[in-house]
Image (cartoon, coloured by chain):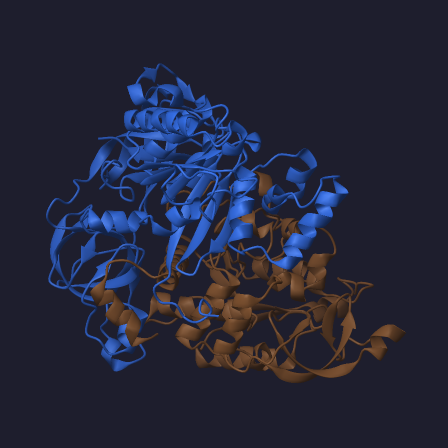
Chain colours: A brown, B blue
Amino acid sequence: MTATTLEGTMATTSLSLLDALESEAIHVIREVVAELERPVLLFSGGKDSMVMLHLAVKAFAPAPVPFPVLHVDTGHNFAEVLAFRDTVVDDLRLRLEVAKVQDWIDDGRLKERADGTRNPLQTRPLLEAIEQGKFDAVFGGGRRDEEKARAKERIFSLRDEFGQWDPRNQRPELWNLYNGRHRPGEHVRVFPLSNWTELDVWRYIARENIPLPSLYYTHEREVFDRDGMLLAVGPVSQPRTAAERASVRTEKVRYRTVGDMSCTGAVLSLAHTVDDVLAEVATTRITERGATRADDRMSEAAMEDRKKEGYF
Amino acid sequence: MATASLDTTATLLRIATAGSVDDGKSTLVGRLLFDSKSVLSDQLDAVERVSRDRGHDGADLALLTDGLRAEREQGITIDVAYRYFATANRSFVLADCPGHVQYTRNTVTGASTADVVVLLVDARKGLLEQTRRHLAVAALLRVPHVVVAVNKIDLVDWSKERFEDIAADLRAAAAALGVADVHAIPVSALLGDNIVDRSVNTPWYGGPSVLELLEELPSADADAAAAAEPFRLAVQHVVRPQSGEDRFRDYRGYAGQVASGVVRPGDEVVVLPKGTRTTVVGIDTADSLAAGLDTLPQAFAPQSVTVRLADDVDVAHGDLLAAAEGAPVPTQDVVATVAWLSEKPVAARQLVLLKHGTRTVKAQVREIAGRLDLDTLDRHELESADTLALNDLGRVTLRLAAPVPVEPYARARRTGAFLLVDPDDGGTLAAGMVDG
C-alpha cells in the first residue's frame, strides 16, 4: 500500500489496473465467505498464493482471515519455501493443514512415477484433504494467462463428488454474480487471480511490498541441463545421463515458479530486487510455464487432463 | 523497460468478441495478441509446430486462440475463453465468445461484463443476420461501446464506397436497436491493416486503428461515473473483529463492492429491503486502516470497501445500501427479460432461486409472456411461447418469496441484473434483466 493510492482515490473516480484487479479479487474472496460454509485457501508459499493470501487479509481487515490454509507437499519442495510458508502462517496466526504426497507413497496408496515428477501425484492427496476437511470452497492461485485449459475456466468452478472438472459443462458466469451452489459432496474451486497476468502479479508484489521466498531472486545454484531447462542439483533431481552430468555448473539463477524441484526449472537471472524482476518479466519472450515446467511440456493437453482429474 | 515499472495510470478494459469461424475473428484476436507482443516465443513455436503438423503454410495465428482437446478434435470452440494483452497504458481482458449466434448463452455471458463488444463484418458480404443479432445482444446487455471491424477490406480493393455503405447500414441498425455508441473501422486482420497501426492502404479513412480505439474508449464504470449514477452497494459480509487491536474492539463495518455511484461520509443511505434510513460515518479499506485514516473521503464503483453506519441498525449479508434519495422500492413482483442458459427448459409455475446482488430468494415463474427474437428485437415483438429453452430470450413475470430492491436494467446494469438458479442442483438457469 502506498500513499499514492489514497491520494489517487481523492482525486479521481476511475480505478487503476491494479486497483481494479484487487477490487475484483477481494469481491470474489468475500463472496465465497458469504455464500459457502467451509472455505480453505491453497497455500504453497509461492508468489501467486502469497498474493492471494495478501488479498484475503485485505478483504477482511481489521478482522482476521476467516479460513484455514492447505498445502499439498510433494516432498520435493525447496526447503527455503517450506520455512517461508511456516513463517507466514505463524505471523498471521492461520491454521495450516498439510497433505503429504510422501505419506501416500510410503504406505503404497501412490506409486512414484518413472520420470520422478510428483506434480501429477498431488491430485489424490488434495482431494482427500478437501473431503476430510469437508471443505466446500477451495481458493486456488491459478491464472487464465498461464495455460490454455485455464483460459477457459470460470472464477467459480464446480467440481463433482470425485473432484472432476467438466470443461464442457461449466456454469456461465455473468456480471459479477457468482454462483457457488452445489450438491453435497461437490465443491467449488475459486480463482480470485483469474484475470491477473504474471506481470500484474509482480507489479502488485512491488506495490504492496509482499515478501517472497528468496529463490524468486538471483542466487548461485548448482544446476544442470535437461530438456532445455535448468534443473537444480539436489536430492530429488540428480543428473542422469552423461550429457546431464557434463552440464553441471554453478550459475546465477532465479525461479519464476516454485514447485516440485525435480521438474521446476530455474532461469538465468541477475534480478536482485522486485524492480529487477519486473523489468525482466516485462521483456521476457517465454511464458512462465514454458520456461519452467517440464510437466506441461508432456503434451498439448497435459494441464487439461490433470485439471479434469481434480488437479489445481 | 518503461512499461515494466509501476505504472499507476494504466487502466483495465474488458472486451468481448463474437463471431463464427469464417469471419476472421480468430485471426483478428491472434493479430491483436501478436502485434501487441503478448505472444511469447514458446507459444509461437507451439503454433508453428502445430501449423506444420496440420499442413498449413507458416504460423496460423488463429491457433493462438485454440483451447481444449475436445475442441481441437472436433474443430469447434465450445466455450468462452479469456485472453490478455496490454499496451503501455492499458491492459485488456478479452472474452472470446465462440460460435454461431444461436449460442446466445456464450455471447450473453461475454457481453455481461464487457465495456466494449468487438464484431467482425466481411467487407464482401456486408451486414449479415448474424451481425444484427450480435448487435442486438450488445444492445440487450447494454454494452456501452461496439467496435465493428469491417474485415477483408483488401478483398474489395480497399474500397471507400464499400466501407461507407457498410458503416451506414451499421449505424442504422445500431440506432434501431439502441446501441449507445458504435464505431466502424476498415481492416484486414490477415494483413494487419488498421489493427495496431493505421494502414497506408486506406488513406481515405481518418479514424483510429482498432487498438488505438480500444486504448481510448472509456470503461463502463467510467461511463457510469460520468452519468452520475446513484450509490448502490450490496453487503457481502459484516466485519466485526471482536479481538485484536483495542481501537477495533467495537468495529462494525459492512463489506462490499460499490455497484454504482459514489459514497462519502455524511451521505444519507437506506438499508434495503427493510428501508432503515441512516448515515455513512466512515469508509475503510485495509490500506486506509493501516494508514491510520479515520475514513476515506469517498468510494466509487467498482471499489471493494467497508462502510460504517451511524446507527446501530440491523444490516446483514444480502442487504443493499442505497443513496436515500431515489432509492429503489423493494418488490415481490418482477417483470424481466431472461436469456435461458440451461438445457433444462422452463414453464410457468416452476420454482427457482433468484440471486440479485448478494441476496438469494425463492421465486416462482408466474407467466411466460413470450419469446423474443433477436432478428426483430428492435420491434419489441413477442412470439407466444409456453416454455423457454436453451439459448431462448423471453419475457417473464416472477413472484418472489421476499421483496428485493431491483431496478430497471436500462438504468442500472448491476442492480438491474439477476441470475435464476436451479434449487435442486444449483446450476445457473438464466440471466435476467429487469424491465422498466
Q: Position of residue B245 (x, y in %)?
A: 29, 81
Looking at the picture, tell me which residue is in the foreground, A27 or A137: A27
B106 sits left or right of B8 in the view: right
Compared to residue A110, the image places residue B222 above or below, namely above
Q: Position of residue B268 (x, y in %)?
A: 11, 56
B328 sits left or right of B87 in the view: left
- Asked where in the image residue B419 lies, by quadrant, the reply is top left
Residue drawn at x 62%, y 48% is A164
Residue furthest out toward the top: B384
Compared to residue B139, the image places residue B315 above or below, namely below
Report the quarter where the N terminus of chain A lies: bottom left
A257 sits left or right of B372 in the view: right
Residue drawn at x 66%, y 65% is A291
Compared to residue B301, the image places residue B114 above or below, namely above
Residue B356 seen in render: yes
B9 sits left or right of A157 in the view: left
Residue drawn at x 53%, y 51% is B35
